[in-house]
Structure formats: C-alpha cells, structure tokens
Amino acid sequence: MSPAERKNRLLAIAPELLAELTETHEHSRDLPALESAENGVVMRFAPNPSGPLHLGHARASILNDYYVRRYGGRYVLRVEDTDPKRVDPEAYAMVLEDVEWLGLGITDIVYQSDRLDIYYDWCRKLIELGGAYVCVCDAERFRELKLKGKACPCRELTVEENLDLWQQMLDGVFYEGDVTVRVKTDLAHPDPAMRDYSAMRIVNAPLHPRVDATVFPLMNFSVAVDDHLLGITHVIRGKDHIANTRRQRYIFDYFGWKPPVYRHYGRMGISGVVLSTSGMREGINSGIYTGWDDIHLGTLRAIARRGIEPEAVRTAMVDIGIGETDISFSWENLYSRNKELVDPKANRYFFVPDPIEVVVEGAPRHEAHAALHPNDPSRGVRTLVTEGKVLLPRADVEGKSMVRLKDLYNVKIVWDGDTPHVSYAGDSLEEARREKAPIIQWLPADAKLPCTLLRQDGSHEGFCEPLVAGEVDRVVQFERIGFARIDSVDNGRVSAYFAHR
RNA sequence: GCUGCUAUAGUGUAGGGGCCAAUCAUGUCGGCCUUUCACGCCGACGACAGGGGUUCGAAUCCCCUUAGCAGCACCA
C-alpha cells in the first residue's frame, strides 16, 4: 500500500486517527527534558578545590547551568573540600575565577569545610538510627571480609558503644587510619562496592587550610547530607558517580529523605592536552609547563589564553549534551564554535613568519590600505607604507616566479640559487589572477614588530604589523594563518597564542 | 573477576515501531564569491556494531555475541 493509499484507507475506516498519521515529529535542538522540573530546579556544581577547572569541569558545570537557566531556580556552587590531602589553598580562588569566566549563573556558594558540624550531627543521628557503626578494623582486613560478604566484629556494636566511639573520634582519641564510620548497607549486595562504605574518617595531616579539624566526612556522606539540606532537586554528573548515587541512596533512605533526580552522562575523552591535576602540577613544578595556563594543559585558563571564548565552550558542551555513551571531545567542533564568535570581531593583520627581507626593484613608493575587517568597511583600514623594502613569508615565495603582495602590487621573482631577485610587476590585480599568482601577506621592512606565534606544537618567529600592539588580550586574525590571541607586548615584542584556523 | 551502563557517518548529535533509501552541526572534497588557503553561498561524501527473534512493519522492542566505559578507597 502506498502512503497515499494508506491515507485514503485510514480516512475511510478511522478518520479520527488521521491527524496522528500526518503529524510530524519535531526535531528539537534542545537537550532532553528533566522530569519533575516544571516548577524550577535547584542544581549544583561541586568541584574539589585541588586545582583550576578544566574541560571536564566545564561539561558538568555548563550542563547543570543549562538546566537551571531552562527551568529557573537556584544554582549552588558547592566547594567539596573535605579531603585536606587534596585541597590546594590556591585553588579556591582559581575555581571562583574559572566559574566567573564560564559565566555560570551561580546563586549560592557553600564550602563543605564550613559545615563539618552539620555532618557530625547527622552522623550521630545515623548512628542512633542504627544506620552506621564505628569500625576499628584495618582497611585491608575489612576489604577482605567485605569481598566475602562477611561482617566485621564492629558491626555488632550497640548504638551506645558506637556513640561512645564516635565521641572519642571527635575528641581526638584516635589517629588517622585507626577508625572509620561505616554506613550499614547490605553485606550480601551483589556489588561489593555497595557494602558498608565509609562515611567519616580521620585525617591528621596535612592540616586543612580553612578549618581546624581532624574528622572529615567522606564524599558520599557529605554529598547526601548536603544535597538534602540544600534542597538539590536534580543532579547531572558523570557516570563515574553511578555507584556513588546508589551509595548515597542508603543515606536518603535511612533519614526518609527524597533523593534528587539524577542523570549520568558518559565519559568524555579529551586528547591533546593534560588533564590530571597531579600531572599538571608535576609538570609545572618541574618546569615542563609555564603554569596552570600553559597551552598544553586542558584547563579553562589555558584555552582562554589561546583565545577560546567561554561562550564557545558553552555551546560545544551543550551540543555534546548528557548522553550516556562515551564520547571523544572534538577540538574541531569547539574551534568551529569559537570561530563563529571571533570571526566577526577579530581585526585582520599581517603576520610574516620566517621572513626574508627583499628589495623590490623598480617599485614606486606605495601606501597600502588594507581593511581591518573585510566584511565591515566601517572599521577602517591599516595603512602600510613601503619604498620597496619588504618582508615576505619564506614558505610562500619559495619556488614562485610571481606573487601579489596583498593590497599592494605584483612582484616577479627570479631565483639565483637560494637568492630571490624581486622586481616590481605592476598593480594589476587582474594580471595577478591571470598568472595565478598567490596573494600573500607582507610587511614594510621598516615598520614592523617582532612577533612570536605560540602553538602547541612549538613557536614560530616572525613579524607583525605595529597596530597589533593595540590588540592585547584580543583575538585577531593573521591573514592566511588563522586566529590568534595577542597575549602581551613586551619591549615591542609581541607574543601571540594561536587559536585555530 | 564481580556489579552496572552504553553502542547512529571521521567527530558530536536527532530519532523511543510506520514520517527514516535516517536530522543537524562539524569535517573532508568540489564549485561560486573574494586583493586571506578566512567569512558567506551552492553541491558532494559519509552511519543505524554483528547475529537472531517479536511484528504486516524495527535504527527504535527482546535475546545472544562483540566492543567500549564506569565502579569495586578511611579520593571527589
């Protein structure tokens, strides 16, 4: 039956269903809806302050931000600094800077280290409920028992005994590694990862930079307590947290709390940059990297330095979405997003890498007017004046017999071994086209700035137009080369970071 | 090994039984435009992991295989 016949047949037997047949599915570009979000959401971004934010954090924070914007509500930045061993005091400020750079709509900021008393309180309540016990077993020993599904002796302690031990923990009677508070789950749980996990532990060293304490909650406990107390309604996080979500559910159940709605997205592989905090830190300490914003790193400050705009990161991350499949992050797609943003506003300039200086024989004095932006004449021109002595990019003239210097004139080149003899060949653009002469960038030999173009694969020395000095911290386009962010001008020397083509 | 999740073009993504000889973006390759190999415009290329079912009909549901990933810490 053809579609038309089907339609007629349906019209005859069940006209009320016809609308359904002809209705077309919408191809929505939005991310999937969240359940129970119609009346607003409370979401969170919960980084550990161990270093600056990187691309992985960007996905988590932007996706949550996306839904807060979509449904309205609150967005909590929760700094999860409950492990003194993994807190870098300098990271607090860096996290805040990065959050601001991303433009997240944060409405509340909480530090877990300010809330230790709250966790202690709920820990005591959990013990009173019989939902937790203080375990003095050696970690190795417990692990063996757990894998066999067997209880350790501590599990049989009475509530009173547990409360007593808990108080001793708080009083500093124990040392690091001696005791832990475990949540009673199910020793027969098919996934050993679920069995009686730790909720509280002791850390004697290093000292926490923000709080004087030795008893700290483990992530699953503080997260569950905070998610409830802060009224978090929806959580979007990586699938590495799926097991944690199940563990946290035990706490919610013990206290009779309603857990948030969770979504777990897949792993995002990112190639080409270093992402591990420890790897970055080592590299910085050993001098391999210049700092947290070294362009070989995957930190947000590193990609910002390369001229990638936060809005491009946001678009790229929303485009990736919350799918559960593992994906590989595409720099190409990010660059494309950034180009959309940057192309309309970046001024155009000449950068001549690996220059050769030549004198154009027979060239009249010439004043070239090159548009700052080809699609926006109102922006004006750069004026380059030359008497004939110019810098040309070696790679673009080698082996050529004729080229056109953009916005200037044509030249003929005669090669004497490696030495080019360059002569004026008229102003006619038509002729250059006819001869298929490449149109290349150039610089007057007496009006130029030394410029280093830094890329991940190394640096390129050359010269650029003097006006570039006025573009510090902005992205420009070096014609025929690509977009670059002007990082600094030092004693007339320009440093530029390559963004993308 | 145990527990669980996933599988659409090079990359990301849409799709949730018939609109799918599969969407959009990016990429690559052509062409047009252009005093940039940019931007813009036009066109082309390119995928339902494999095998069984269920069904009149499967990318969509079920099973198996394969592959990948995650967790199995007194980290987050």
Image (cartoon, coloured by chain):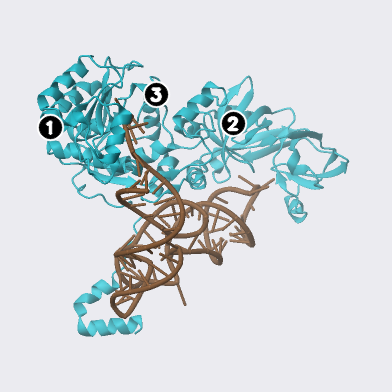
Chain colours: A cyan, B brown
- Front residue (pair A168, A35): A168
**On the picture, is B22 further left or further right than A213?**
right
> Which amino acid, by three-letter code, is at mark 1?
Gly
The residue indicated by pointer 2 is A496
| Residue located 27% across and 51% down the image | A33
Q: Which marked residue is nearer to the observer: mark 3 or mark 2? A: 3
Q: Can residue A389 be seen in this snapshot?
A: no
N-terminal label among 1 and 2:
1
Q: Position of residue A150 (x, y in %)?
A: 23, 38
Q: Can residue A329 be seen in this snapshot?
A: yes
Query: Circle 2 marks a residue in which chain?
Result: A
| Real-space Cα separation, disc 3 to disc 2, in angstroms | 27 Å
- Front residue (pair A78, A347): A78
Question: Farthest right residue?
Answer: A416
Q: Position of residue A8 (x, y in %)?
A: 28, 84
Do dots 1 and 3 share one subunit?
yes
The residue indicated by pointer 3 is A91
Q: Quadrant of the C terminus of chain A?
A: top right
Query: Circle 3 marks a residue in which chain?
Result: A
User: Which dot marks residue A130?
Assistant: 1
> Which amino acid, by three-letter code, is at mark 2?
Ala
